[in-house]
Amino acid sequence: MVKRAITLGGGGPAAGLHIGVLEALANAGITFDVWALSCIGAWVGIVYNQFDNVDDKDRAKKTHQFFKDGVFRDDESYKRFPLNTVFGPDWGSLGNVLTNFVIDPKNYKHLWDPSSMVNAVRDSMSLWFPQQKFTIPDTGDINRWILNQVLAPNPFVRYLTSMMYLSHVTGLSRINYPHSQFMKSINFEELKKSGKPFIFHNAWNLDEHKLALFSNRPMTTKADKKEYGGPISASSLCACSALPFIEETIEIDKVTYCEGALVDTVNFESLLEEHHKPNDELHEIWVSRIVDSKQVRKPKDLHDALANLCQLFAATVGEDDVRIFKYHVRCDEPKWKGIIVEIQVPGHVSFKWNHSNLDNGRKLGRAAAEQAIKTYHEHAKLEPHDGPHFINEHPEKNDKEGWQRVQDTYHECEKRAAA
């Protein structure tokens, strides 16, 4: 009996790729005993597994509908409101925080800084009148002058800037509302039922600086660098995707967490520690990473720039995680002799939270998974040989025809988006 694990990495608006991958795997009859998840991969994996009495082939459709109805915004609305439907500011908390800031006497100290004002006048004169002669400075010098000699010494500006950056707000948005209709639409109790695969996701413990793992069944992790955070819940799911600055940090049982994907996006180490045991070996690990540095494009606006900032880190962490794990599998003793199947990331998905990108990602993910499945079956036809086995590392070289179909799918999606 083959024991399989799948790892779904982080990547936010590229979630459609995961859904398409799961759809293709279900169509091929490939199931998994262990699900290792992070960030948006945790959302997709948990939503996918929460449906009761549903055929595997229908789970992807229902998962796609969940994200289309509850997370991604319709194209027409997105054109002039480029945000997803769940990253909403916590207006009540913001009001309280700003009120507390205004009434706290300490926040009025150090606003008036005479020495800085005197220095600003002196520096301004030396910039605009070097050697007692008026000179127009370079644009860069002017912008720096406005920041440091005009704005920084101004008491009113200092107050507003400190209110913006030093109030007790840890993120632009909040999604941790466990009792909201949106979170209640996920049936976490269903994950605990007998017959469900083992499911776990990570988050970063900011108090103890270690990776925390949350699961649908108890874990035994007691490593120095990892801990068992507890059962999967609405709050743990939000914690695993609480990307600093974008989303508020989340407190669970007096411990503060943020996203864990930027520390470990594929959970390889935990897979082998927890799920590869004597007489219960893990034979296969399938990898769906969804973000890649090839996806990063020249930004046209702040929307693109912010998306690139988040995704570039996620992409490089994911790429490095896979490389490092391959190195350890090849070199460490005793060697794990199983199979790693990489579902290669199509480099053509955008970072938009709109319906078109979700739909296109699903098509691209399905095509990429079908190509990986084909390579996996071809490897199975070979004579038995020693592992570890790395399947589908370079499809553009070893399966040009299959990888070309993925590229063709992208061009179809591109034409549809342009129309």
Image (cartoon, rainbow, N blue to C red):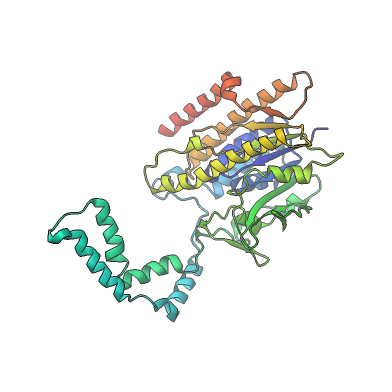
Q: In the rendering, at what x and y percent does residue 237 appear?
A: 64, 54
State which quadrant residue 390 falls in.
top right
Residue situated in front as seen by the camera: 35 or 341: 341
Q: In the rendering, at what x and y percent does residue 404 appear?
A: 54, 22
Left or right of 65? Residue 387 is right
Task: Look at the image and tell me in which quarter the C terminus lies.
Answer: top left
Q: In the rendering, at what x and y percent does residue 277 appear?
A: 82, 42
Residue situated in front as seen by the camera: 207 or 141: 141
Find the residue positioned furthest to the right: 279
Q: Residue at x 45, y 75 (%)?
A: 101
Left or right of 396? Residue 153 is left
Q: Residue at x 51, y 24 (%)?
A: 408
148 versus 357 height, above or below: below
Res. 349 visible in picture: no
The mark total stands at: 0
Q: In the rendering, at what x and y percent does residue 305 appear?
A: 42, 46
Res. 402 visible in picture: yes
128 versus 44 height, above or below: below
Find the residue positioned furthest to the front: 131
Q: Residue at x 59, y 31 (%)?
A: 344
332 versus 158 height, above or below: above
Find the residue positioned furthest to the left: 133
Task: Look at the image and tell me in which quarter the N terminus lies.
Answer: top right
Q: Residue at x 64, y 41 (%)?
A: 8
